[in-house]
Image (spheres, rainbow, N blue to C red):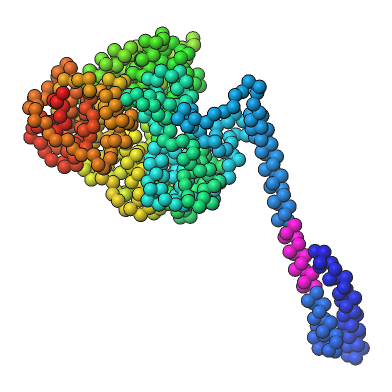
Amino acid sequence: MLKCRTVWKKLAPLARASSTVCRQNLRRAGLNNGRIPACVPAAHMSTGPAGGGRQNQLYALLVGAAGLGGTIYAYQTVKGDKKRYQERLDEIASRPYKQATEEAAVPTQTDAPAVSEPEAAPSPKKSSPAEKTELPPGVASATALTKIPSHAPYLLIGGGTASFAAARSIRARDPGAKVLIVTDEADLPYMRPPLSKELWFSDDSSVAETLRFKQWNGKERSIYFQPPSFYINPEELESAENGGVAVLNGKKVVHMDVRGNKVKLDDNTEISYDKCLIATGGVPRNLQVIERGGDEVMKRTTLFRKINDFKSLDKVSRNVESITIIGGGFLGSELACALGRRCNESDLEVIQMFPEKGNMGKVLPEYLSNWTTEKVKKEGVKVISEALVKSVTYKNDKLEIKLKDGRMVKTDHIVAAVGLEPNVDLAKSAGLEVDSDFGGYRVNAELQARSNIWVAGDASCFYDIRLGRRRVEHHDHAVVSGRLAGENMTGANKPYWHQSMFWSDLGPDVGYEAIGIVDSSLPTVGVFAKATAKDTPKAATEKSGTGIRSESETEDVATSPAASSTPAPLAQPHKDDYGKGVIFYLRDKVVVGIVLWNVFNRMPVARKIIKDGEEHVDLNEVAKLFNIHED
């Protein structure tokens, strides 16, 4: 603008002279014609003397240049002010967080220097701004200061097993891929099975903080898939030369624009994508009678699913006299055995109630369900079967659970383990179909829901070419479906054919693995044998070297063992001692499900039997394939 003013000072006399010439020409025209025509000034401006016309052109040019310069100056001034204003707001907003960080960074006189030991590292949270930190009022979380990338070539919604498996698969096929995982949890991707299994059997009193545990085989590992060093910060994702996997913690995707290939977060931030995976998992169900009980009842109820739920229940179990678990399925029975172990260490009373006649009544045949119930009782758990809850109230510092048959149970805390509801919150905005029978997003054989959108894990309802449309809520399915979705997001176009397995342990001595449709309403045939010291979950993990058994069971290199030459006895479904055995589930005389009871590392055989889909005249002969009669 200073340059414009200098030019104006030099040309101002010329502009005034030009204006004077125009006025003189106008007067002459008026005297000659006796009047002043309306259009004369314009005509004389262009047809006057040669010198005056040139000056008029310079005048017009000068006025135009001045106007353009003023416009540019105004635009730059406004833009600069806006930038300085935003920087000022950001600086003010970050003051409390910086102050808290600086105070936390000042060591006391008794503090020792921190030593980094990867193997002994406790809970591996991200060291980025997404790390969980006690912040002053007014700062919701450290993630508020994280620069969120505006674009992610691969966007994975959900931070569970399926998302991590997909990220690993994408990077394997596309080493330079840039992957962004968005999760509303504060933790990096982790395994959920140990939350109800091994963590409860740890002798380390600080296990809730370290989240490290000894597997049945004695080896120690962390609950997290990878340490923080495996990931890159979200703000570095777009500029990362070799790509990487970034995790955006504490953020939830609330809206999907499928046509625009972008999503909106709960803070109104938008992220565009090229390919997107929905792996939102599910939400624990609750009983309506508990919800109607009011705030005091809800405060004393745990819906078990995440790390914080484990930490909370671990703390509760050390400070109350009684805990009641409602539910007799996988989770309820595992937690009952885990908490029952503490009955021997303290005065904690553990109660388990369910509407079925025995534990795992919807999965196991009745005779095996009854045997399992007795096993749970021996762990110190008080079992109440055929229990239908009528109401739950809080009275005299106790929760009163009234059953429909008139029985009443008083307890301090409730754990509701009554199933999982698939998270399909994005279905409406994304225009995705939800299955009315099984729940979850309906996907095709390649786990694709729409163009550039795939679904994996608990939230996917897929078509099984052998068993029909299904939805599976197990760790192995999350691993396999996430891995396949990642491959297909990079162009593999592979169909889902794998029969995922699942497993459950009632402590280190009793466990089972299953595959296919295992429903107690189906006819079953069980073949059992006497168990040995090798037929336990502990022995199985010692042999395989892994605590998450599906990691070894789902490898493509696994081969089926040779059939045993030892003659198999006839199936004995009412034998009192079920040390180890195989239970076949039939539909139209075809095996559609198999449970391996204390039989391990035989899943490839079970998978092949279901894949073949053949009728078997004598299942005792089929049982020989599992070598259950060998010592």
Q: Residue at x 14, y 37 (%)?
A: 590
Q: Where's residue 270, x and y in %?
A: 54, 48
Q: How many marks?
A: 0
Task: Residue 346 in the image: state x and y as whole percent.
Answer: 41, 9
In the image, 54: left or right of 212? right
- For the point 60% across and 40% down, the residue is 145
In front here: 66 or 290? 66
Residue 625 is drawn in which quadrant? top left
Q: Magenta region, mostly helix, strand or loop?
A: helix
Classify 82 as above or below 123. below
The quarter in which the N terminus is drawn is: bottom right
| Residue 18, x across and y down, in percent | 87, 80
82 relative position to 240: left or right: right
Q: Position of residue 99 (x, y in %)?
A: 68, 33
Q: Residue at x 37, y 20 (%)?
A: 201
As for residue 316 lying within the magenta part, the answer is no
Would you identify the image quadrant in which residue 596 lies? top left
- Which stretch did the figure color magenta? 63-77
